[in-house]
Image: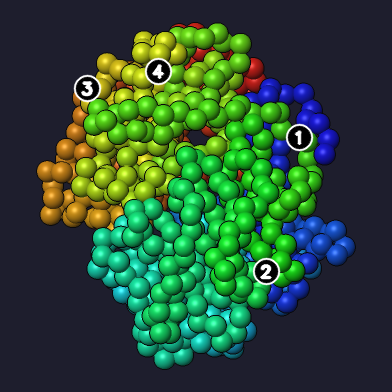
């Protein structure tokens, strides 16, 4: 891989292309589909390992993050979203020739994708529209028929996560059963798993733990084997189990590992399970022998694993990265990349230091610190970088935007506040019915810890976040205006009631679960936890970035908030872009980072103004 041509290090980290974790064909495992940023945006490529040839398949203006090959390896399948609003339908194009894509199926409604499961006789898709969630089946390529529908959220199992790359996890190997994540009681925080007959739609078994999450991962790859890997929260943390989707029999695996452990893949003969362990923001992989219960820890690099699967020959591939190094596609036991993107290398990033502190309730809170080079011991300007979700977490990961803030002289502090995943069910669910305030309480406790230790300058504090992090930022801007010198809210929830009215149905369901109701049924709680309620107290300089076609944090409610500021004579800096919740275009990501860096240099004393910003600010 060649070195990067001259440009600032912060921009070079963005420009260095990266590869996603690939998906391979069931019939021809040397035909793979992989996403890459080599073209300047995330697009799908068809990769033939036998010949070494790799061809760009998609040229979508919005970009494409993931796709799968057809089972026979002759096609490429992806979800086509024309605007960035995350709505559309599945399409397919040939693997080996440049032909315009066509709809994969016929008759299913356009909407938000809730998963795809390919079969030879039956192909299943799940879709969300504004008024329902539905599961559709195509038999032998015919127009789809409705299998199941409900007004509450549902999805195919295995649609997300590190192992979600096969495109068939929710369908049994003999194609008689399909498994769903169901939330028909409205509790989207604690889904259950249900199996159904693919032909008749009859419900066969359901695995539900009241008040706890049950997550399905995938069917055994052996025909006639009706077992499904699942994770349970009965011990307070995710633990793997095997569930028979026909009989309902459950076997909880005896796993003596700390942290959260999930079963992300089967070995081809169903003799063993690939386990993904998450502890304090870092991953490990293990092989679990089903017959003996023996666990073997696999040889992987340190950091975040954002893709892992077992090849048909039993070889384990994974994708890993950390704060210092971008993602690499590796096989277990080797540090030699399986494939490298065409393009220059990225400069090294910054190490993420594990950080623990205590909140006002005596609870230990986890986070990461990134220290600027040659900045001295402090006190330094500090950026409190708030993760989204809220049910997500900050991990040891490659993040060019975060690295740029460190380059600008900031001590970057990332807090896994109450509500974050990866620290047990009680920690995650403590947020329910008490959103916004708990996150701020933990974040400010982290700030106090850094100030007490002499690392952070309390007069130069930036609160910044995207999505739910943007919501927390705006809530902090109005409730604690004296704590922050500058604020950055990317794609935020700014007016919660208007956001609820306009957002995607899955987000509405999440809000109903988080608030235990709608803005109509619990108006006082929505009002109390709404950033616009406190807009008149906002004092620090504020930058807002928002997507015009965002269906998660819609644009109208952002303008409501900006309008209220302008009524007071306060003019925030506002930047909008013409896709959805996030841009998959590298130029756009560079532009947004330049805007942020320019804003920081103008509003925080002592912040470095990095080179190369002006070219992206016009």
Q: How many marks?
A: 4
Whole-Å distance between the Cαs marked 4 and 3? 25 Å
Which numbered tag is attached to residue 537? 3
- Which of the 4 quarters of the picture holds residue 569? top left
| Frontmost residue, 216 versus 592 | 216
Which residue is the site of mark 2?
69
* Of callouts 1 and 3, the N-terminal one: 1
Q: Mark 1 or mark 4, which is nearer to you?
A: 4
| Frontmost residue, 582 versus 432 | 432
* Of callouts 2 and 3, the N-terminal one: 2
Which residue is the site of mark 4?
450
Whole-Å distance between the Cαs marked 1 and 2? 28 Å
Give the residue drawn at x 24%, y 48%.
Answer: 432
Q: Is residue 453 visible?
A: yes
Q: Mark 1 or mark 3, which is nearer to you?
A: 1
> Is residue 481 left or right of 593 when viewed as pictured?
left
- Which of the 4 quarters of the picture holds residue 121? bottom right
Q: In this view, does 420 lie above or below 513?
A: above
Q: In this view, does 361 lie above or below 411?
A: below
* Residue at disc 4, secondary structure: helix
Report if the CB atoms under discs 4 and 3 are less than 8 Å apart. Answer: no
């Amino acid at each position: 891989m060649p070195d990067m041509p001259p440009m600032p290090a912060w921009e070079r980290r963005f420009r260095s292309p990266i590869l996603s974790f690939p998906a391979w064909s069931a019939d021809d495992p040397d035909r793979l589909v992989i996403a890459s940023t080599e073209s300047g945006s995330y697009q799908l490529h068809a990769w033939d390992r036998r010949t070494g040839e790799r061809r760009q398949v998609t040229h979508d203006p919005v970009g494409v993050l993931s796709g799968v090959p057809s089972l026979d390896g002759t096609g490429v399948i992806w979800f086509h979203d024309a605007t960035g609003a995350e709505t559309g339908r599945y399409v397919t194009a040939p693997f080996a020739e440049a032909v315009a894509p066509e709809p994969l199926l016929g008759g299913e409604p356009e909407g938000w994708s809730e998963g795809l499961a390919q079969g030879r006789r039956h192909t299943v898709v799940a879709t969300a529209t504004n008024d329902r969630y539905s599961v559709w089946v195509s038999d032998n390529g015919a127009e789809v028929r409705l299998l199941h529908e409900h007004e509450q959220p549902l999805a195919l199992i295995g649609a997300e996560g590190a192992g979600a790359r096969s495109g068939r996890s929710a369908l049994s190997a003999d194609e008689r059963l399909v498994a769903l994540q169901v939330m028909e009681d409205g509790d989207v925080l604690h889904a259950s798993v249900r199996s159904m007959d693919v032909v008749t739609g009859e419900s066969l078994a359901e695995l539900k733990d009241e008040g706890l999450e049950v997550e399905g991962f995938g069917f055994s790859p052996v025909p006639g084997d009706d077992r499904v890997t699942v994770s349970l929260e009965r011990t307070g943390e995710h633990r793997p189990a095997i569930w028979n989707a026909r009989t309902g029999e459950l076997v909880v695996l005896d796993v003596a590992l700390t942290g959260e452990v999930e079963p992300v893949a089967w070995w081809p003969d169903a003799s063993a399970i690939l386990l993904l362990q998450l502890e304090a923001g870092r991953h490990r992989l293990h092989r679990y022998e089903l017959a003996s219960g023996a666990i073997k820890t696999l040889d992987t690099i340190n950091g975040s694993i954002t893709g892992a699967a077992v090849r048909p020959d039993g070889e384990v591939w994974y994708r890993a990265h950390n704060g210092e190094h971008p993602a690499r596609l590796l096989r277990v036991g080797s540090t030699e990349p399986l494939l490298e993107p065409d393009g220059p290398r990225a400069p090294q990033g910054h190490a993420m230091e594990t950080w623990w502190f205590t909140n006002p309730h005596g609870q230990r809170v986890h986070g990461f610190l990134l220290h600027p080079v040659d900045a001295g011991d402090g006190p330094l300007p500090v950026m409190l970088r708030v993760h989204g979700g809220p049910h997500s977490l900050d991990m040891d990961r490659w993040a060019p935007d975060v690295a740029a803030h460190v380059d600008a002289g900031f001590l970057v502090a990332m807090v896994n506040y109450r509500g974050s995943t990866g620290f047990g069910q009680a920690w995650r669910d403590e947020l329910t019915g008490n959103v916004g305030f708990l996150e701020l309480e933990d974040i400010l406790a982290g700030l106090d810890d850094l100030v007490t230790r002499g690392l952070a300058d309390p007069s130069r504090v930036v609160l910044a976040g995207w999505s739910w992090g943007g919501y927390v930022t705006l809530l902090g801007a109005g409730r604690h205006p004296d704590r922050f010198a500058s604020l950055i809210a990317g794609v935020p929830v700014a007016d919660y009631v208007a956001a609820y009215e306009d957002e995607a149905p899955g987000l509405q369901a999440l809000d109903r679960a988080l608030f235990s109701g709608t803005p109509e049924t619990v108006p006082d709680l929505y009002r109390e936890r709404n950033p616009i309620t406190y807009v008149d107290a906002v004092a620090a300089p504020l930058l807002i970035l928002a997507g015009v076609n965002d269906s998660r944090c819609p644009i109208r409610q952002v303008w409501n908030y900006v309008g209220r500021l302008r009524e007071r004579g306060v003019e925030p800096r506002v930047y909008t872009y013409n896709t959805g919740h996030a841009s998959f275009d590298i130029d756009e990501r560079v532009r947004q980072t330049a805007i942020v860096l320019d804003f920081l240099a103008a509003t925080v004393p002592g912040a470095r103004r990095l080179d190369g910003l002006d070219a992206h600010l016009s």
